[in-house]
Image (cartoon, rainbow, N blue to C red):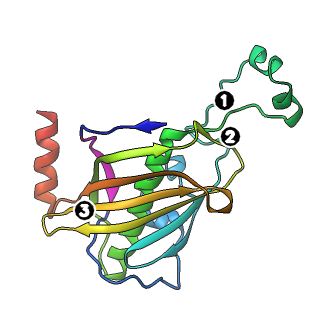
Amino acid sequence: MTVPTDEPSYQPVHAMSASAGDNASPSLMPIADLVPHSGIMCLLDEVLEIGEEHLRARITPRADDPFADTAVTEPALADAPLAQTTGASSPGIPGWVGLEWLAQAIAAWSGHTVGTQGGKPQIGFLLGARRYDCEVEYFALGEPVEVEIHLDYRADNGLGAFRGELLGRDGVVLAHSTLNVFQPDSADALAAMIEDSTS
């Protein structure tokens, strides 16, 4: 599955920050402390590794995930004996949700980076992706997915880019993309962006 994203889609990513080098951090905070999404919208399960220019996290898709597709009808199951015998009742998490996993991994990296500098996470935006290529229609329930992002660059004007990959069993690449992000340099700049978007 390929999702082209030629038009910007303004979605929040939190706390972009400049960095250099790539040394892994020995202490990892709970994901909820790094990604200020509330409740079930904090999609990642745990951070595995954070460096100055990368982050690795994990998510295990579950049936109670807000994006889980549970619309499997009885006739469909009747035509799929294997699904019945294995107890499968849902195809899993749609492949396009992986783009949000990558965005939240950037948010977690950014929140950690700002925290180590004594600051608080600042609102940022996912502007879009050059291309999101996903090899699966659904991420299977119960099958862990590792989410990896690497900082490519961050300019002084707040624009940045990250390379991201979603890895399945044995490190098989399930999806990849380059995400373009932006963090306003002040609360006034953010307020101006919000006002422009609503006018």
Question: What amino acid does circle 3 point to?
Answer: Gly
**Distance from label 1 to label 2 (Cα)?**
7 Å
Question: What amino acid does circle 1 point to?
Answer: Thr
Q: State which mark lies toward you, 3 or 1.
A: 3
9 magenta-colored: yes
Q: State which mark lies toward you, 2 or 3.
A: 3
Reading the image, the residue beneath label 2 is: 63
Reading the image, the residue beneath label 3 is: 160
**Distance from label 3 to label 1 (Cα)?**
36 Å
In percent of width and height, residue 145 lies at 61, 56
* Quarter where residue 119 is shown: bottom left
Q: Which residues are magenta?
A: 8-14
In this view of the protein, which residue sits in the foreground, 108 or 155? 155
Instruction: Specify which label sits upstream in the sequence, 3 or 1.
Output: 1
**Mark 2 and mark 1 in contact (Cβ < 8 Å)?**
yes
Secondary structure under the numbered disc 2 in the rendered image: loop
In this view of the protein, which residue sits in the foreground, 67 or 137? 137
Task: Examine the rendered structure and indicate whether residue 119 appears above or below residue 146.
Answer: below
1 magenta-colored: no
Residue under the image location 51 percent in, 65 percent down: 31
Q: Is residue 16 left or right of residue 39?
A: left
In this view of the protein, which residue sits in the foreground, 116 or 178? 178
Categorize mark 3 by other alpha carbons within 10 Å: few (<14), some (14-19), many (20+).
many
Reading the image, the residue beneath label 1 is: 70
Task: Examine the rendered structure and indicate whether residue 53 appears above or below residue 11.
Answer: below
**Distance from label 2 to label 3 (Cα)?**
34 Å
